[in-house]
């Protein structure tokens, strides 16, 4: 919980890379909020322009429990996955 709150504070200050890392660290801890923390890390990495890392973490979050990921976060990351797949196909 503390890592997630720290990540929220970092994100609010505009430090997306550090927020993403803090969320990712929170996602390594066995807890019911693990999938959510990984999805938030993915969201922050995507906002920071690191699509590869974002999609890696999103895939891990989905395996843990796609239903635990908020719809708006899931939709944004699915769009990133689709756009990345389109870019790779070209």
Image: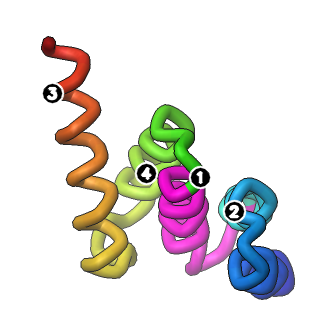
Quarter of the picture holding the C terminus: top left
Of marks 1 and 4, the one in the foreground: 1
What is the quadrant of residue 32 in the picture?
A: bottom right
In the foreground, 15 or 57: 15
Tell whether label 2 touches label 4 (CB within 8 Å): no
Residue 16, numbered label: 2
From mark 1 to mark 4, how far is it between C-alphas?
A: 15 Å
In the foreground, 49 or 45: 49
Q: Secondary structure at mark 4?
A: helix
Q: Earlier in the sequence, mark 4 or mark 3?
A: 4
From mark 2 to mark 3, how far is it between C-alphas?
A: 25 Å
Q: Residues within 10 Å of mark 2 (few under 14, many from 20)?
A: many
Q: Earlier in the sequence, mark 1 or mark 2?
A: 2
Which residue position is annotated with label 4? 58
The spot of residue 40 in percent (x, y) is 54, 68
Q: Residues within 10 Å of mark 1 (few under 14, many from 20)?
A: some
From mark 1 to mark 3, how far is it between C-alphas?
A: 20 Å
All told, the count of numbered labels is: 4
**Which residue is drawn at the image coordinates 49% and 33% (left, top)?**
52
For this orientation, the residue located farthest to the top is 90
SS assignment for the magenta stretch, majority: helix
Q: Which residues are magenta?
A: 29-47
In the foreground, 84 or 23: 84
Residue 48, numbered label: 1
Instruction: State whether residue 54 is above or below residue 52.
Output: below
Tell whether label 2 touches label 1 (CB within 8 Å): yes
Magenta run includes residue 55:
no
Tell whether label 4 touches label 1 (CB within 8 Å): no
Q: Secondary structure at mark 1?
A: loop
Q: Earlier in the sequence, mark 2 or mark 3?
A: 2
Quarter of the picture holding the N terminus: bottom right
């Amino acid at each position: 919980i503390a890592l997630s709150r720290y990540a929220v504070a970092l994100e609010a200050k505009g430090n997306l890379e550090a927020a993403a890392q803090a969320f990712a660290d929170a996602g390594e801890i066995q807890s019911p909020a693990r999938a959510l923390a990984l999805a938030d890390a993915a969201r922050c990495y995507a906002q920071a322009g690191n699509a590869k890392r974002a999609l890696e973490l999103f895939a891990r979050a989905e395996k843990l429990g796609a239903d635990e990921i908020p719809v708006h976060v899931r939709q944004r990351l699915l769009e990133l996955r689709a756009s990345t797949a389109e870019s790779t196909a070209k």
